[in-house]
């Protein structure tokens, strides 16, 4: 099973945004961070999950994928397959499409203190601006 932690950081809302992805695969660990441009914090959180899914599809296409995020709005949207805000619908559609390619995909909300590594990566990505 692949454990994936995602987070986003924005300076302003909307504002310059970065994402962080931390992946644990048994003994191996991977880190990715990317400056993504001007987004709201919630949009950046959705984009972090999308980029992480794309990365997993490329590197671990046949694995069970377990995501963790401290973004409750994103986790709730994925679990309930519903968003109140129409702006998020295209992000949810992309997540559903990408996640359906894995044998099993799980996502779980975690407190911020359990997501420090991904948070540090997202903040590092902001500095790439």
Image: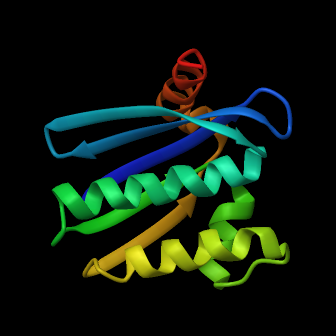
Residue 103 on image: x %, y %: 25, 81
- Relative to 84, is 34 on the left or the right? left
Please state, as top left, top right, bottom left or bottom right, where the C terminus lies in the image.
top right
Please tell me in which quadrant of the rendered image residue 39 appears.
top right
Please state, as top left, top right, bottom left or bottom right, where the N terminus lies in the image.
bottom left
Count of marks overlaid on the render: 0
- Relative to 18, is 60 on the left or the right? left
Q: Residue at x 37, y 83 (%)?
A: 100
Residue 53 on image: x %, y %: 38, 61
Q: How is the image coloured?
A: rainbow
Q: Residue at x 27, y 43 (%)?
A: 24
- Relative to 124, is 41 on the left or the right? right
Residue 11 on image: x %, y %: 78, 26
Please tell me in which quadrant of the rendered image residue 83 appears.
bottom right
Please tell me in which quadrant of the rendered image residue 106 appears.
bottom left
In the image as oriented, which residue stretches furthest toward the top? 127
- 93, 121: nearer the viewer: 93
Q: Is residue 60 above or below residue 69?
A: below
- 47, 117: nearer the viewer: 47
Q: Residue at x 53, y 23 (%)?
A: 120
Residue 23 on image: x %, y %: 32, 43
């Amino acid at each position: 099973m692949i454990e994936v932690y995602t987070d986003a950081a924005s300076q302003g809302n909307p504002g310059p945004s970065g994402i962080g992805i931390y992946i644990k695969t048994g003994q191996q660990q991977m880190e990715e961070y990317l400056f993504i441009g001007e987004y709201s914090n919630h949009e950046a959180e959705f984009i972090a999950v999308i980029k992480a899914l794309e990365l997993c599809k490329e590197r671990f296409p046949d694995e069970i994928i377990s995501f963790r995020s401290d973004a409750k709005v994103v986790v709730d949207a994925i679990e309930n397959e519903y968003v109140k805000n129409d702006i998020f619908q295209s992000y949810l559609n992309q997540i559903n499409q990408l996640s359906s390619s894995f044998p099993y995909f799980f996502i779980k909300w975690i407190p911020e203190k359990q997501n420090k590594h991904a948070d540090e990566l997202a903040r590092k990505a902001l500095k790439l601006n």
